[in-house]
Image (cartoon, rainbow, N blue to C red):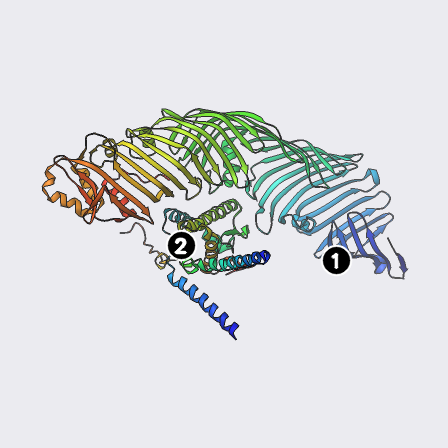
């Protein structure tokens, strides 16, 4: 207080105070005066009032009927002007310190404070009815989302060193400018009990969330009876939560602990654990909104999950997850499913930990996978699996030395392994492809995923149609993207043409064939580039070609050629002999440059006749549109070739 | 002497690099890229005249 | 005088070279299965994005992406979906630019193609939609 002066006149007493300063508030140019008949008009003006860093200018309190009788002073028709004019009444008794104050900013809004202000015996009760919370917007830090609406009704009692609050909140709305942190129509209750002893506050709080919605990027939650109970001590700028629970109805209960340093704003210790969370409702209520537009956007979940997460000032200290019968299924498209996953996965900072998961089964693109045991080894962001075996139909895929880790350019993983013979018949049927006879097997020296590219070292051997197909230099870019790009070199040896043509319903060709497809490039699973050569295998074996197969091969060159056969005497023969079959295609920019076994006048020989009766098929068109060729093949095999499953 | 020759080479390389930059800029077929972009955008945003045509909403169920 | 003449000649050669290139420019290859798949995916998504462009919730960025601008116009329950839509669209757009460059055998063109698209998306945007100007500020078209 600086520079006070009393000025006494007959009709007015006024008091000028330059400044009042307290830790939480300050007031500048305070002037109080009593005037009017009997000095019953009180006017208190503050040029600038600062509370918690916010300013109000030209604040005034006027009272037209100040009454004083002995130590009691009262006013029934006061007005507080803080920009809006708020009717007010009060009474105060000096000595006893009895106080009663009532503000009525709106017809249904009341702020009532009653009690006694007398040092240690201070007891104040505040009763709030429909208090508009937006009045406090200015008091909140400007970095927080703006509180736009809300009402509070309840009581706050202050008795000596004990505080007790019971407040109902309704219609709370808040939002930041981007709309990424916002809430609407929030209703709930806040209960707080606190007691101060020495320099510590011992407190207990309960917050219930009854209704409304919150979007806090990226999480969306609606109020459905969630309840947070916390108990702790706040002392010397440190709050310690010694016990807390967060209850999500129908999902589970999470136990909480923590230590928070106010000055640095840092969490020194935090712990969250739960014995059981229901996967189905947790997915529906919490995860589903997060996973929209991803492959995990529509799952059916089942089972239970337990976890314990501990963090200190340096970050995550330990995490442990326990799964009990967890299943997920892609509800819409059934692209993948996981059944009965159980096990415990522990992780600790700076240590190597081991865990194990067991799977009752799984399904990938409608191919069922059998029961699997997955031994896990964790360290930092790295995951390792020494060996695991995934049964697929009558065979299995074995993984060895699996190692995964997070790097700057995303996830990276590698493994080696082998494929125990898997029935091609069952596999092609499950994938909805034409049934092929044979089996797939092979050794995978190393499969690597890094920088969005999946690459295989070594060769995968597929035993198909009594021959072998070898895939080498296999590389798949962006396997999980919208347009995966596959590169590979394929080599096929001694495929039985009879089995092959039967599978694709192409007529019948007896014999064996070799093929080489080098520089194969698939974009979105469709060929865009390759050099392919098809030729009869060396050796002696029966070589026959059915009339229908001849027609089909001819039809690849256009409808006219096939009709030509029909018109000639050749139509009387069921089968023909041949010497060699050969066809090559060099695909570039949607055009296939074709060639055959050898040159023919103005064309090339595709089937070179031999034996009796012999037949030769000659192609004349060297440049054929790939799309047209595929269409013709599709027409020939009569929808036996199904489009690729995406 | 050798020092001078060295500088000369550096000078020529620099010029090449500068020229190279210019060449790359010219080399990008901006007009073709723009046409390609237009075709794709028209398709994605359905801006083609026939796609903008208002649908003829016929009352359902009445013959 | 001679220096000016030389400069003029050089400019003329440069212009001719540019003109030559422009005249010789064939169309870019955009008929690949991958580009078709991306185009389909983006076209399907456009039905959901269109009202968001119109309300200003989502805008077109100067680098050929889309971005969440002001989600306040979108009901709370759908905001997570808007985020997901934006992320999915940008993923497709990145793949599209990369695929066009790759389909033409010039992976190094990716950023030029992105820049071209950025400009064309904005040019073709409907009135009322928001886009980022050269300095990154949102502008209503």
Give the percent coordinates (x, y) of residue A364.
40, 32
Determine whether A209 is above or below B12 in the image. above
Direction from residue A117 to residue A466 in the image, left or right: left
Contact between marks 1 and 2 (CB within 8 A): the answer is no
Q: Residue at x 78, y 50 (%)?
A: A25
Q: Nearer the viewer, residue A460 or A206?
A: A460
Both labels 1 and 2 in a single chain: no
Q: Nearer the viewer, residue A304 or A534?
A: A534
Which residue reaches farthest front? B1
Q: Residues within 10 Å of mark 2 (few under 14, many from 20)?
A: many
- What chain does mark 1 sit on? A
Give the percent coordinates (x, y) of residue A442.
38, 28
Question: Residue C134: which quarter of the image?
Answer: bottom right
Q: Residue at x 46, y 43 (%)?
A: A293
Give the percent coordinates (x, y) of residue A383.
53, 31
- What chain does mark 2 sit on? B
In the picture, the disc for residue B40 is 2
Give the percent coordinates (x, y) of residue A541.
21, 29
Q: Quadrant of the C terminus of chain A?
A: top left
Q: CA distance from mark 1 to mark 2?
A: 59 Å
What residue is disc 1 on?
A57
Mark 1 or 2, closer to the camera:
2
């Amino acid at each position: 207080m600086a520079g006070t002066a009393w000025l006494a006149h007959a009709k007015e007493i006024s008091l000028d105070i330059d400044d009042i300063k307290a830790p939480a508030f300050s007031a500048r140019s305070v002037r109080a005066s009593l005037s009017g008949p009997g000095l019953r008009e009180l006017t208190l003006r503050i040029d600038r009032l600062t509370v918690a860093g916010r300013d109000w200018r030209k604040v005034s309190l006027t009272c037209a009927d100040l009454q004083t009788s002995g130590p009691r002073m009262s006013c029934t028709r006061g007005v507080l002007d803080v920009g809006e004019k708020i009717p007010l009444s009060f009474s105060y008794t000096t000595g006893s310190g009895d106080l009663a104050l009532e503000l009525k900013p709106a017809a249904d809004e009341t702020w009532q404070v009653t009690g006694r202000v007398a040092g240690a015996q201070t007891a104040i009760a505040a009763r709030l009815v429909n208090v508009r919370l937006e009045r406090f917007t200015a008091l909140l830090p400007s970095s927080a989302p703006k509180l736009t609406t809300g009402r509070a009704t309840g009581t706050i009692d202050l008795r000596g060193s004990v505080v007790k609050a019971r407040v109902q909140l309704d219609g709370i709305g808040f939002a930041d400018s981007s709309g990424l942190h916002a809430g609407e129509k929030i209703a709930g209750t806040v209960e707080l009990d606190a007691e101060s002893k020495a320099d510590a506050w011992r407190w207990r709080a309960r917050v219930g969330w009854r209704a409304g919605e919150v979007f806090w990027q990226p999480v969306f939650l609606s109020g459905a009876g969630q309840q947070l109970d916390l108990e702790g001590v706040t002392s010397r700028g440190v709050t310690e939560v010694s016990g807390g629970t967060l209850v999500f109805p129908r999902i589970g209960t999470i136990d909480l602990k923590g230590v928070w340093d106010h000055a640095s704003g840092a969490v020194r210790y935090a712990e969250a654990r739960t014995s059981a969370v229901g996967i189905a409702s947790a997915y529906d209520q919490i995860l589903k909104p997060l996973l929209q537009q991803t492959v995990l956007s529509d799952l059916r979940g089942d089972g239970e999950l337990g976890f314990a997460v501990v963090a200190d000032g340096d970050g995550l200290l330990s995490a442990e997850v326990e799964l009990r019968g967890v299943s997920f299924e892609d509800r819409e498209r059934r692209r993948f499913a996981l059944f009965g996953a159980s096990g415990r996965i522990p992780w600790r900072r700076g240590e190597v930990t081991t865990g194990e998961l067991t799977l009752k089964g799984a399904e990938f693109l409608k191919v069922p996978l059998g029961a699997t045991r997955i031994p896990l080894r964790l360290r930092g962001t790295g995951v390792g699996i020494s060996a695991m075996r995934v049964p697929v139909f009558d065979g299995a895929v074995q993984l060895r030395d699996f190692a995964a880790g997070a790097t700057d350019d995303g996830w990276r993983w590698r493994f080696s392994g082998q494929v125990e013979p898997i029935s091609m018949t069952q596999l092609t049927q499950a994938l909805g492809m034409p049934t092929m006879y044979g089996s797939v097997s092979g050794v995978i020296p190393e499969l690597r995923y890094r920088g969005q590219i999946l690459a295989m070292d070594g060769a995968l051997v597929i035993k198909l149609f009594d021959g072998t197909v070898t895939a080498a230099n296999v590389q798949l870019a962006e396997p999980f993207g919208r347009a995966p790009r596959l590169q590979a070199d394929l080599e096929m040896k001694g495929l039985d043409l009879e089995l092959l043509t039967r599978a694709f319903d192409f007529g019948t060709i007896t014999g064996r064939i070799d093929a080489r497809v080098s520089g194969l490039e698939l974009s979105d699973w469709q060929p865009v580039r390759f050099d392919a050569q098809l030729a009869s295998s060396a050796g002696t074996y029966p070589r026959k070609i059915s009339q229908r197969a001849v027609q089909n091969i001819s039809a690849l060159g256009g409808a006219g050629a096939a009709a030509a056969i029909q018109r000639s005497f050749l139509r009387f023969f069921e089968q023909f002999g041949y010497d060699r079959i050969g066809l090559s295609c060099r695909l570039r920019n949607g055009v296939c440059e074709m060639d055959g076994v050898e040159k023919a006048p103005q064309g090339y020989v595709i089937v070179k006749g031999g034996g009796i009766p012999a037949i030769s098929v000659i192609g004349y068109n060297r440049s054929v549109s790939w799309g047209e060729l595929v269409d013709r093949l599709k027409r020939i095999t009569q929808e036996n070739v199904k489009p690729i499953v995406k | 002497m050798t020092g001078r020759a060295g500088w000369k080479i550096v000078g020529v390389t620099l010029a090449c690099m500068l020229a190279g930059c210019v060449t790359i800029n010219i080399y990008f077929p901006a007009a073709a890229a723009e046409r390609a972009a237009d075709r794709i955008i028209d398709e994605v945003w359905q801006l083609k005249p026939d796609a903008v045509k208002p649908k003829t909403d016929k009352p359902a169920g009445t013959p | 005088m001679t220096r000016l003449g030389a400069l003029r000649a050089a400019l003329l050669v440069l212009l001719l070279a540019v003109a030559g290139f422009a005249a010789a420019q064939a169309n870019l290859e955009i008929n690949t299965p991958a580009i078709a798949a991306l185009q389909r995916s983006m076209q399907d998504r456009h039905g959901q994005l269109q009202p968001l462009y119109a309300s200003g919730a989502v805008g077109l960025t100067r680098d050929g992406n889309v971005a969440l601008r002001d989600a306040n116009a979108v009901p709370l329950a759908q905001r997570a979906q808007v985020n997901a839509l934006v992320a999915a669209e940008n993923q497709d757009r990145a793949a599209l630019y990369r695929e066009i460059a790759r389909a033409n055998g010039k992976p190094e063109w990716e950023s030029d193609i992105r820049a071209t698209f950025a400009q064309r998306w904005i040019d073709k945007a409907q009135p009322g939609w928001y886009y980022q100007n050269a300095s990154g500020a949102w502008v209503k078209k």
